[in-house]
Amino acid sequence: MLPSGLPEIVADDEALARLLTSSSHFNATTVKPSAFLPNPKAGMTTSVFRHDAGNLIQLARDRRPDVTVHGAAICKAAAVRSAKLDVIAEEPPPLHANIVGWPVNEADLVLQKAAQKERALVITSKCKLVLF
Amino acid sequence: MSEPFSLIDAWAGYGDGTAVSAEADTIRRSVSAVIESVHESVWLFGLRGEAVSEVLSVAAKHSQARWDGEGAEPVSVLAIDRAIAFIRALPRSIPVPEIAAEPDGSISLDWIDSRSRVLSISIGVSDRLAFAWVDGTDQGHAVARFDGERIPPLILERIRETMGNASVRAA
Amino acid sequence: MTNPDSLRLAHSPIVEMVVDIDCDLPADLEIADLEQRARECYSDQYPGFRRILRPLPRSGDSREQLNIREATYAFQFLEEGPQLVQLRRDGFSFNRFPPYADLDEYLPEIKRTWSVFVDLVSPVTIRRIGLRYINRIFLPFGEDIVNLDEYLRLGPGLPHETALKFTSVLNEYSAIEDVTDHEVKVRMVIDEQERTDQPLPVILDIAGSHRRSADPQVWENIEATILALRGLANAIFRSSLTKQCLNLFR
């Protein structure tokens, strides 16, 4: 059991929220793959919260007080796993998890990016967009 | 004594800025005047002008490090140049993409027909472009080289397949 | 023996010749970090220095400073004479200005300065080799820019039945040679003239390109491409001008 009270293993049917800190990461109806891409210089993970669509504004205020949060992309952990990635709980902060397992190809970073983009597209094809 | 420097306009043209004589400048001005008048023509340049403006706008909004609060890189100058060159090279029959910033400083051009029909291209510091697509149950990724003037045929084909059923807006 | 692709003119109209070698540099290389070493390598013969910037678009925050390091696109190293070397974020350029004799005379220096570039930046691969000639041709016209076709084969024609006179001209075409994949872009520019009692300057810009991956370490292949583009450019130059015009330079 984690400090937040959630189980250590993220279940397939758990809702995950990826906070959207760039207005370019979504349009009126759709989340774009850029919203999920990992930063290769920041541990090659994508930060999410084990949270559904309820009370997202409070979550955003607590977890990202330093940037404007426009909304969130909500998906199930199963959607992440269908993209051949995984979700691993990592607290603190409470409710925090990382999407891990992004493809790596040190010999060809451009091809690595293409492969990561494909996985991100699979996730966003199963995301719901919630705007604040 | 302050060091001399010159500014190249982002519109100077990909690969067209290495000649420095006064005559080269005359050529550039004449060609720019034509390009400007083309851009002013809605019929000739249309939505591509808006897409180029969107690239500059997205780049400006993401010009600081850690713009996402997590360690994102600012959009790179080279990515801006290449993205603009790419948009300008799009045939008129191709719809214009949506623009996004990526955490590694690249620019993403996205053709979105629906949540499950998307083509996304990353434009960064290399002339090799990473792109990926989902189309219902079909998905994939590849790399293609953009020389600054001609869109790789593979990418054009993918755009047409992704957006094929949508009404095509003039580019 | 005279090189058949060479075109030696007693009064060359070339005002600028540019050799471009565009290449992929190592992904982690920042041009700005090379300034000190680059200056040391080139300053003996090219003491002048200029930094070329491509600025990021401004966010609207008036306090934002231009980040010189990130915006640095190229360094230019200037000779006290008529040559310039450019170390760019996307390749190398060598510029030659008047007096202009023949490309063969400048190739050793192009090779030398290219080798310095290769040692400095370790380019991964060459993407494009370009050779560009910008010519300035003075046509002995008086008041009227009408009969361009007495001198220029590119010239547009004005209908004879009208009293139209050109005030400015811009002609451009692009072409590709199927067998070699060599490309050219040819531009002719006549700027609006304030004084009509002076000879008319026509700018003829012939830019050849070869886009193919090549090994930066193999100079012979680079030189062969440059010389092939020279042959193409000279053929275009000859065919773009009438005999009457070519005689102006002999």
Image (cartoon, grey):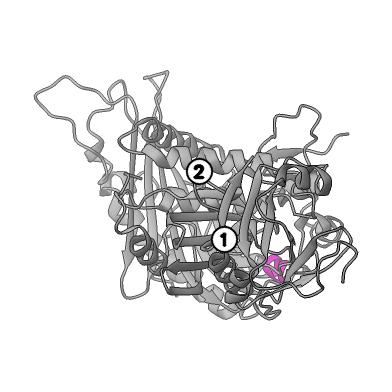
Amino acid type, callout 1: Ser
Q: Give the range drawn in magenta.
A: C112-118
Between circles 2 and 1, the one closer to the viewer is 2
Residue displayed at 31% across by 53% down: B166
Asked whether C128 or B65 is in front, the reply is B65
How many numbered tags mark residues here?
A: 2
Find residue B40 and report its horizontal and vertical position in percent. Answer: 39, 30
- Residue B20 falls in which quadrant of the image? top right
Q: Distance between the residues labelled 2 and 1?
A: 21 Å
Secondary structure of residue under mark 1: strand
Q: Does the magenta stretch include residue B69?
A: no
Asked whether C98 or B171 is in front, the reply is B171
Secondary structure of residue under mark 2: loop
Find residue A15 and report its horizontal and vertical position in percent. Answer: 66, 62
Residue displayed at 85% across by 34% down: B2
- Residue A28: mark: 2
Which of the chains bears the disc numbered 2? A
Residue displayed at 46% across by 68% down: B134
Task: State whether residue C34 appears in this view.
Answer: yes
Instruction: Give the overall secondary structure of the magenta segment.
Output: helix
Q: Quadrant of the N terminus of chain C?
A: bottom left
User: Dot 1, how many residues are within 10 Å of its Cα: few (below 14), some (14-19), or many (20+)?
Assistant: many
The residue pinned by badge 1 equals B122
Amino acid type, callout 2: Ala
Find residue C109 and report its horizontal and vertical position in percent. Answer: 66, 65
- Residue C183: mark: none
Labelled pair 2, 1 in contact (Cβ < 8 Å): no
